[in-house]
Amino acid sequence: MSHAIDLICGWIWSPVLVILCLLTGLYFSFGLRFVQIRRMKTMVRLLFSSENKNKKDGVTSFQAFAMALSGRVGTGNIMGVATAIGFGGPGAIVWMWIVAFFGASTAFAESTLAQVFKDEHDGQFRGGPAYYIEKGLRSKVFATVFAVAAVIGLGFLSPQIQSNGIATSFHNTFGVEKWIVGVVLAVLLALIIIGGVKRIAKIAEIVTPFMAIGYITLSIVILVVNASEVPAAFSNMIRSAFGFNEAFAGILGWTISMGVKRGLYSNEAGQGSGAIVSASANVSHPVKQGLVQAFSVYIDTLMVCTATAVMILACQTYNVIDPQGNIIFNSPVAELGEPDVSYTTSAVATLTGDYAAGIVISIALLFFAFTTVLAYYYNSETNISYLFRKGRHEHLVINIFRAVIIIMVFLGTVIEAGTIWNLADIGVGMMAWINIIAILLLSPVVFRCLRSYEKQEKEGEEPVFDPNELNIKNADFWKHKNEK
């Protein structure tokens, strides 16, 4: 069974998908004139905009940003970075940066499209790849395939990684049985998801910024203590990324693959899940939420992932294992095994000691991973709503799914971690293949939207969206809104 899973994962994550992710980011970066750099100031301003703060429909831009960031900032930032280094070498982090930089334009594109083609359903805004594939590409079949892939990838496979990370950390630190952690997580999840998107958004709005700022602050303290090793850590990353470090030159292809794979898993640019959350925001123009979500990619990868990576590399608490299972770098300061959360914990331990480090990482994982599960739930629910929105059984199916994801979270605490990562990679890869093709085909819509937004800005107007002016078909929500 494990061999079959590895084989499927290898097919989906072939070099073709790795290249496609990078080329898509390049395409949108040039097509949007590097919007991810030149509109940085606007991203921050819109993030804290008070627009629609007191309206009942949808959520605010910041809440949607926090929900998307909670999906991005998870175990991928702690365990994922450790596995990227452990299997791809230090250079994998540079490729995570590259994916994030160009991926910010991809995130802008998919989030803008999610706003353009969103629907209002049962008092909530719903959207994402399934919606813009059906309306923009007029392909119900293609849209349905994505929705099914999203439910499987985010609802059945990915939550187990998050709960496994929490349970493993709490078991190692406090000696708590993993199944007990699983029960507690399942109960907490049930209490929150019953409250719907508003409750999820409120929790994400409070918890996500707190956890990101706290974790980055901790990493800065550790790096100050190990300041003399930081330049060497950055040099090691850059040299290894392009095959200039002899120790890791033999695994350069694996370095790139691991960096892109873990980068996409962490920042989700191109995967489509960030776009699903983006549709829930109530804004006057789709580009506004596109800019906000592009910024969340930077926070996830360039800040939080980098914080973890430099801690591990500066403290040298890592091993590197090649695809054949041979150790090609052994930590000189700690006895470590297979790449996992222990790499990060050992780095923190250089400052706090082993037990305190375990507590810190356990708490960080609890916040990071649990809020990610909430984002996975919302994304899956939106796709279930898409699949069943014209039938009588939508609410029944959603309630059944709530029970299923609660069970998945529990099961994730008691099964093998390696298998879970491969299953999640399969889910993410399926979504990425479908979504990237869709946003490339719909790229003219993205370009028109940005031109419209910037033209109105230049004329001193508050940008508003009118699909008729841009000759965009099937943007029904906006047509009805403008008619009102």
Image (cartoon, grey):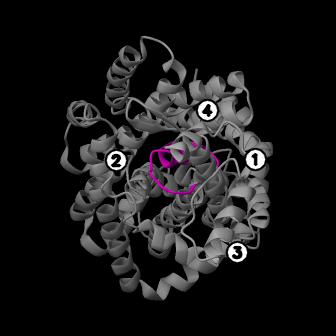
Residue at the spot of label 3 = 239
Q: Quadrant of residue 363?
A: bottom left
For the residues marked 3 and 4, what is the alpha-carbon distance in whole angstroms? 41 Å
Residue at the spot of label 2 = 371
Residue at the spot of label 4 = 130
Classify residue 132 as left or right of residue 125. right
Q: Amino acid at mark 3?
A: Arg
Classify residue 248 as left or right of residue 399. right
Q: Position of residue 447 (x, y in %)?
A: 74, 58
Q: Earlier in the sequence, mark 1 or mark 3?
A: 3
Q: Residues within 10 Å of mark 4 (few under 14, many from 20)?
A: many
Element at label 2? helix
Q: Which dot, 4 or 2, sits closer to the camera?
A: 4
Q: Earlier in the sequence, mark 4 or mark 2?
A: 4
Q: Which residues are magenta?
A: 270-285
> Is residue 326 in view?
no
Q: Position of residue 115 (x, y in %)?
A: 56, 47
